[in-house]
Structures are given as structure tokens and as C-alpha cells.
Amino acid sequence: MTKPALLSTGPMMPLITDQIEAAFEVHWMHKAGDVKAMISEVGPRIEAVCTGSHTGVKTDAALLAKLPRLKIISNFGVGYDTIDVPAAVKQGVIISNTPDVLNEEVADTALGLLLSTVRELSKAETYLRAGRWPVEGDYRLTPASLRDRKVGMMGLGRIGKAITRRLEAFGLPISYYSRSKQAGVSYPHYADLTALARDVDTLIAILPGGPATQNIVNAEVLKALGPRGIFINMARGSIVDEAALIAALKNRTILSAGLDVFQNEPKINPEFLTLDNVTLLPHVGSASIFTRDQMGQLVVDNLILYRDRKPPVTPVPDTPFKGW
Ligand code: NAP
């Protein structure tokens, strides 16, 4: 049996690489000397794409147009904002992602980032490592504490709920912002982000990137969050007007921020590195071997199911499975 042709937009972890190479004729974009020539040669035969935000390649309309036989884009990650969804829908392509298996890991990281930002934990460790403790005395008392805070969740989906389970154990009052109020959820719902920011002092973002949420955290929202305000971004860099955030951190319009995600990752705006009131993580939300292995297996499972003409496990809601 000839293997179907698959295009990978970048390197994949060995767990994925080994299995897709066994099941497909794989064409690697990052190994091609001339990507354009490679796509024009194999594009007409490609039936599956393996991708992820880490590859830095957008599966946009221009690329999709060169893959007329494409049936599935299997995305490593729950967020699939690097894929042109309307173009995929138009072309009848199924997109699959890796939901649920990463909920608890990302929620753990979110709480770690929140605590580190509020109680300045990484700054305190840097102070100790620099030998300042015996010379200058105790690290300062932190201006912020979780004890008197109110949290506003931006997004209350699978990961958002894993975060709020933890926040409840911390005894924190919770409200949330999303497009629709959820039945059976008792937290106050806000359809207006500025109004939520005004009523809380801590915003935690865990919603999708893409055109619908582009720059929703802007100067107005940050002003509403106010001088005690803390902004935690576990979502995507694209949801924040980064120039407005940097200005708000510099001018102390808000107190501080904790960021796991950025525009133009991994080449983040260097101004962030000059600020002492922001905690920075290199997009490590789901980044444990345990969780990444589960995500990787889901990427492979969706591809193999396509090869065997069986329904995918995790098609995204925009492209429900109706047959291959
Ligand atoms: P999910 O279950 O689909 O939940 C998404 C939440 O966001 C829902 O509450 C949804 O409510 C809300 N939402 C969606 N579109 C919105 C919009 N345009 N405006 C306002 N609210 C909106 O997704 P999930 O599995 O929790 O993942 C959420 C996101 O987290 C991913 O898309 C990804 O970007 C990010 N993420 C980051 C990391 C990391 O490493 N930092 C890891 C995993 C995921 P409504 O539909 O009612 O609006």
C-alpha cells in the first residue's frame, strides 16, 4: 500500500516523528532547501498536514491553495490560531487539535505564574543568588498579596475551569469574561472586558488567539484594571496591545504582569526585559514531558485515523467531522 503524503510545517517531537514516518510519506518544510519548489512538487499529493504554533509557519490561505487534496490539519496544541480557519472550512479540511490532555498542566503553570508575579518569587530567588541577602538584609515585603484579591477570568473553558478550581482552593472570589454566559456557572459573567477589569484587580487570560480577540487587552482595559492591577497572560500574545501593556507597566498604570505568551515568539519585544514589574516565561504552559507526550500522541492518533478513514478524535468545533 502506498503511504499518503503528509507535510510537516516544522520539526516535531520524536514520538510524533517516528509514528508519522512509519505511516506517511513525510515532507518536512524545515529540511527543504527550497520550500517553494518542494511545495510545488509535492503540494498536489499532500493529504495531511502536521503543524503547531511552535513551527512558526502559518497554515494560511496561500499555502492551503497549493494543497488541493488536503483532508486534515493535525495541530499540536489546543490553540489553532496559526491556521486560517475560514480558508480550511472553505476547502473542506478538518482541523484537529489537542484539547483536555493539557488542562491540568497549563492550570498548574498559570497558578505558578500568578504566585510568582504576586509574591515576586523569581525576583526573590535572583536576590538570594546574587548574594544580596546577607549584605542588604531580607528581601522586601511584597506590595501585592493574593489575600485581598479578586480574580477576573478572561475565558472560562476547559483550562479556565481547571484554573478556577485551583483559585477556589486559594479562597479567591472569581468573575469571568466570555462571549456567552454559561449555564450552571455561578461566577458573575461579564460580556464587557473593561467592566470586568474595573471590578477586579487581577485578570487571568486563557482564551483563544486570532482575529476575534486581537488586542482586546488595550490601554482602556489596563486603565480600568488600575494601579493595584495584575495581568496574567496564559492565552496568546496577540490578545494584548503590547505597546499599551509596556506603557502601563512603565507608568505604573497597573502594578505588574506575568506573561507566558508574546507576540513574535520567541523573539519577544526586548522592552519587556528592561521592566522590573513583569514576570516572563518562555511559553511553558504545557511544557512537561508527561503532558507533551499526551499531546503528541493525540496529534498522531488524529492523522492515523484519517489514514484508516476513521473519524478523528478531536476535530475542532469549526470543522465538525462529516466523513472523509
Ligand atoms: P476552550 O475550552 O475552547 O475555552 C475558551 C474560552 O474562551 C471559553 O470560555 C470561550 O467562551 C472563551 N472565548 C472564546 N472566544 C472568545 C472571544 N472571541 N471573546 C471572548 N471569549 C472567548 O479553550 P481551552 O482549551 O480552555 O484553551 C484556551 C486557550 O488557551 C487556547 O485557545 C490557547 O490559546 C491557550 N493556551 C495556552 C497555553 C500555553 O501554553 N500558554 C496552553 C494551552 C492553551 P465563549 O465561547 O462563550 O466566548
Image (cartoon, helix red, strand yellow):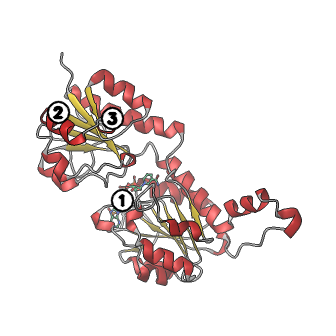
Mark 1 burial class by Cα count in 10 Å: few <14, some 14-19, many 20+:
many
Q: Quadrant of residue 220?
A: bottom left
Label total for image = 3
Indicate the amino acid at tag 1.
Answer: Pro
Residue 40 point in image, percent of width and height: 14, 38
Q: Given this view, does label 2 or label 3 mark the residue nearer the observer? A: 3
Name the residue at 21% across, 22% down: 3
Residue 261 point in image, percent of width and height: 46, 59
Which disc is residue 208 wearing?
1
Q: CA distance from mark 2 to mark 3?
A: 14 Å
Which disc is residue 42 wearing?
2
Report the quarter where the C terminus lies: top left
Q: Given this view, does label 1 or label 3 mark the residue nearer the observer? A: 3
Find out whether the residues at labels 1 and 3 contact each other: C-beta distance under 8 Å: no
Indicate the secondary structure of the residue bearing disc 1: loop
Sequence-wise first label, 2 or 3: 3
Looking at the image, can residue 107 be seen?
yes
Which disc is residue 31 wearing?
3
Q: Nearer the viewer, residue 117 or 101?
A: 117
Q: Is residue 290 above or below residue 179?
A: above
Q: Is residue 270 above or below residue 102?
A: below
Indicate the secondary structure of the residue bearing disc 2: helix
In this view, the residue farthest toward the top is 1
Residue 84 point in image, percent of width and height: 23, 54
Sequence-wise first label, 2 or 1: 2
Ligand 1: does it lie within 8 Å of the C-beta at label 1?
A: yes
